[in-house]
Image: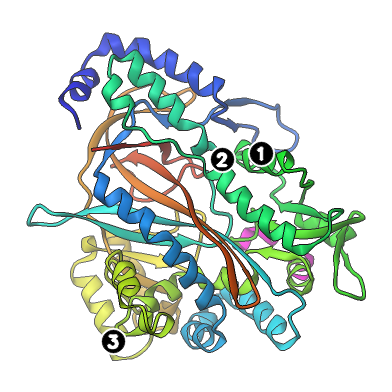
């Protein structure tokens, strides 16, 4: 952090003045979140929570994360195309994790049928933290890769201008120049547009599959509007709408409310509670069986599970997917933290013993997306003491806990008092790819996201109300 910025953080009068300017600037630039809690509650819109200042990120590590993203795109795609690997890797998990088992059953049903659609679309986000080692070095370590409903590409496209303006008001013009342009919304839309074009019907629409109450609606809208700019029609529907009016014709084209669906873009369907009935599961199966391009398709959804992440970190596994690309393997592996199996047997028993002996050094992860699911510290002992002799432990993986260096910043939240916090940040990198048959026709790193939270919180993202939006300040 620059000396100038450190000085500004301690200037209470300046901070008070900048606070109101920052909130107004966020509203002007569309950094918005809906606070409506139920379909029948009043509609309230305010600024999405964000940091008052951008957070310093080492330039070299930032560019390392961007450079490896197209390799992660290819890795996810190759994993999704490898039934033997998915079946072997998830075999223990699906015996004890009902949600993953339901997804896997759909995958098996689709595998047994002739796939009607050769177009694959992936919009993912790889998340990292900066690990500080005892010798003083800092390295980039992957937390997870999100292959379904990777969010905040829209709002992340609007926050650079907000922080640049704040830095200028704070008389920090040099720092303002170190906040990069960023437009993941446009990049994600390019991937959607390419898949829509390959689908080959100008009448067909892109369907965003969404929740009934969508606080993060404006994040969606920025991507949506990029599609409308290209004259690509978009509709928004819920599982219930697909249940009620969805159908397949003789060619397995998917229709919902009379619209032919070119792409199903899943912004819902990644947590068990998203499936409110058996009809929801039937709707997911129908969409997976259809000619529509799925983002993600069911195999790509499974490729993003924690168990797959853990297996990819094992010795020799990456080489299976990149047999003639040692540099690619090295780039990917350099981002891996320690990941350990909890499968039944000697290796899993060692993992349990290791975690119980030093729980503060690890994170226990279930097969869930959406933030706020991980287990830390003494809770790891409570869970593993109960499950150490049970196959139910295989629903989890164990990961080394990243040790970042906290920085000082202010977190702006609607209705909350402003105070200086000790903060931790997580860097996300967005990737988009499109494959037709065996040919990768589009593969890009399309932008980044920084999320920051108070160091008192172990887990949780922006949508969960813990983290806030941020920007990297390259140093």
* Vertical position of residue 74 compared to residue 131: above or below: below
**Distance from the alpha carbon under mark 1 to that under mark 2:** 7 Å
Question: Tag 2 or tag 1, which sits nearer the N-term?
Answer: 2
Q: Main secondary structure of the magenta part?
A: helix
Question: Tag 2 or tag 3, which sits nearer the N-term?
Answer: 2
* Vertical position of residue 157 compared to residue 334: above or below: above
Q: Which residue is mark 2?
A: 154
Tell me if residue 204 is in the magenta stretch. Answer: no
At a point 39% along the width and 24% down the height, the residue shown is: 164
Residue stretch in magenta: 272-282
- The quadrant of the rendering that contains the C terminus is top left
Q: Which quadrant holds residue 29?
A: top right
Q: Are marks 1 and 2 in contact (CB under 8 Å)?
A: yes
**Distance from the alpha carbon under mark 3 to that under mark 2:** 42 Å
Position of 359 with respect to 282 (left or right) is: left
Q: Which residue is mark 1?
A: 221
- The quadrant of the rendering that contains the N terminus is top left
Q: Determine the secondary structure under disc 1.
A: helix
At a point 53% along the width and 37% down the height, the residue shown is: 155
Q: Which quadrant holds residue 249?
A: bottom right
Picture coordinates of residue 325 (x, y %)? 36, 78
* Vertical position of residue 105 compared to residue 441: above or below: below
Q: Which residue is mark 3?
A: 347
Position of 239 with respect to 387 (left or right) is: right
Camera-nearest label, 3 or 1: 1
Camera-nearest label, 3 or 2: 2
**Res 180 seen here:** yes
* Vertical position of residue 69 compared to residue 278: above or below: above
At a point 38% along the width and 74% down the height, the residue shown is: 310
Picture coordinates of residue 111 (x, y %)? 68, 84
């Amino acid at each position: 952090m620059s000396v100038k910025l450190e000085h500004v953080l301690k200037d209470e009068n300046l901070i008070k003045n900048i606070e109101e300017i920052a909130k107004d600037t966020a509203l002007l630039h569309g950094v918005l979140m809906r606070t409506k809690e139920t379909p029948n509650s009043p509609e309230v819109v305010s600024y999405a929570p964000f940091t008052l200042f951008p957070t310093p990120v080492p330039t070299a590590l930032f560019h390392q994360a961007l450079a490896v993203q197209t390799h992660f795109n290819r890795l996810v795609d190759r994993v999704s195309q490898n039934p033997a690997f998915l079946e072997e890797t998830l075999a223990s998990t699906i015996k004890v994790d009902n949600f993953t088992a339901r997804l896997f059953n759909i995958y098996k049903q689709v595998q047994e049928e002739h796939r009607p659609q050769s177009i694959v679309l992936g919009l993912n986000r790889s998340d990292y933290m900066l690990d500080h080692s005892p010798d003083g070095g800092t390295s980039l370590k992957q937390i997870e890769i999100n292959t379904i409903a990777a969010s905040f590409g829209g709002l992340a496209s609007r926050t650079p201008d907000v922080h640049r303006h704040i830095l200028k008001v704070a008389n920090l013009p040099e720092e303002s120049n170190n906040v990069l342009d960023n437009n993941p919304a446009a990049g994600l839309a390019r991937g959607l547009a390419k898949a829509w074009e390959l689908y080959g019907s100008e009448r067909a629409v892109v369907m965003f599959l969404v929740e009934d109450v969508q606080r993060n609606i404006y994040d969606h809208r920025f991507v949506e509007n990029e599609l409308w700019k290209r004259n690509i029609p978009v509709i928004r529907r819920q599982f219930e709408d697909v249940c009620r009016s969805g159908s397949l014709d003789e060619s397995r084209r998917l229709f919902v409310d009379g619209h032919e669906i070119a792409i199903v873009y899943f912004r819902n369907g990644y947590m068990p509670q998203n499936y409110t009935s058996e009809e929801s599961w039937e709707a997911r199966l129908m969409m997976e069986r259809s000619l529509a391009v799925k983002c993600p398709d069911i195999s790509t959804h499974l490729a993003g599970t924690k168990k797959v992440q853990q297996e990819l970190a094992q010795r020799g596994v990456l080489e299976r997917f990149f047999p003639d690309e040692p540099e690619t393997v090295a780039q990917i592996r350099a981002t891996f933290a320690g990941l350990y199996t909890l499968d039944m047997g000697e290796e899993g028993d060692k993992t349990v013993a290791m975690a119980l002996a030093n729980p503060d050094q690890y994170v226990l992860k279930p097969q869930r997306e959406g933030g706020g699911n991980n287990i830390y510290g003494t809770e790891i002992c409570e869970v593993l003491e109960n499950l150490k002799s049970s196959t139910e432990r295989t629903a989890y993986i164990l990961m080394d806990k990243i040790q970042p260096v906290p920085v000082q910043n202010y977190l702006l939240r609607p209705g909350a008092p402003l105070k200086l916090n000790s903060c931790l940040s997580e860097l996300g990198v967005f990737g988009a790819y499109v494959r037709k048959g065996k040919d990768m026709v589009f593969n890009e790193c399309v932008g980044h996201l920084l999320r920051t939270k108070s160091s008192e919180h172990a887990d949780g993202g922006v949508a969960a109300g813990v983290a806030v939006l941020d920007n990297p300040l390259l140093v």
